[in-house]
Amino acid sequence: MLVDERRHQIAQLVVARKVATVAELSERFGVSPVTVRSDLEALEQQGLLKRNHGGAVAPQVLRFSPAFQERTSIHLLEKQVIAERATGLIEDGDRVIIDSGSTALLFARKLRDRKLTVLVNSVYTLNELVGAPHIELITVGGSLYEPGMSFVGPLAEAFLDKIHVDKVFLGVNGVTSKGISVNNVQEAGIKAKMIGAADQVIILADASKIGVGSFAFLAPLEHVHTLVTNVGITPEMMEELRESGMEVLVA
């Protein structure tokens, strides 16, 4: 097994189980405890877990809902490199919205030392950024959509009508030549309002979502300024998206 593949599987296991010891990881993957500790150190630097005395724990303080936990663990390594690439689009002093997607949460973890104004609608992202020394943190109200632990509905949308930010970072479930889309109508409304509140719309989506349409339409490609994705995107799809005027960044 290649190093990257092993580390990917270790990260997925820790996210799913919340905790793992060096001894059990060594036995499971057939490598020495020294190698496991090296893997855990590398994964901690990427923000995928936190080391403790005997192994590692998942980095979140709040317990993920089963639905969100599953979303987070799928294509985890790809989401991590996308999140890292997206940090290059942030400038100190920016006012940004970060939505409730799993890739957006990984992105938020990398911003704790930045000087920003950040608006969120996710309980998980709010928890991640609480206590960040230079971040002014704002959250919307509204109804709690429990599968994603995000605030949605008319109250949340009305709040966003009064907000203007420099950039919004959105996770979506589908990107095609027709536009961007998500799986459920509960989150579609507030994501559309986020798009309307921002000067720049930045989509965080791994390659499995490119060329795929989802249930609830959000916006045509003309409303998207930048897509951050990973190396799995096809050259044909990349060309088609760039022809729409969108910047495509490949992590």
Image (cartoon, rainbow, N blue to C red):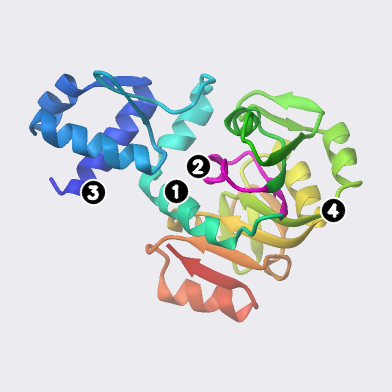
Residue 105 shown in magenta? yes
User: SS for tag 2?
Assistant: helix
- Residue at the disc numbered 2: 106
Q: Earlier in the sequence, mark 1 or mark 3?
A: 3
* Left or right relative to 181: residue 25: left
Q: Mark 1 highlights which residue?
A: 79
Q: Are marks 4 and 2 in contact (CB under 8 Å)?
A: no
Quadrant housing residue 160: top right
The quarter in which the C terminus is drawn is: bottom left
How many other residues sit within 10 Å of disc 2, few (<14), some (14-19) or many (≥20)? Answer: many
Q: Earlier in the sequence, mark 2 or mark 1?
A: 1
Residue 107 placement (x, y as % from top left): 53, 46
Earlier along the polypeptide chain: callout 3 or callout 2?
Answer: 3
Q: Residue at x 76, y 55 (%)?
A: 195
Marks 2 and 1, Cα distance to the nearest angstrom? 7 Å
Cα distance, mark 4 to mark 2? 24 Å
- Image point (12%, 28%), residue name: 33
Q: Magenta segment: does it hold 170?
A: no
At x 38% / y 28%, what residue is drawn? Answer: 15
Distance Cα–Cα, label 1 vs label 3 = 14 Å
> How far is the residue under mark 3 from the one under mark 2?
18 Å
Q: Which residue is mark 3?
A: 4
Q: Secondary structure at mark 1?
A: helix
Q: Quadrant of the N terminus?
A: top left
Q: How many marks?
A: 4
SS for dot 3: helix
Amino acid type indicated by mark 4:
His
| Local SS, label 4 | loop
Q: Earlier in the sequence, mark 4 or mark 3?
A: 3
Instruction: Provide the residue span drawn in magenta.
Output: 94-115
Query: Which residue is identified by label 4?
Result: 164
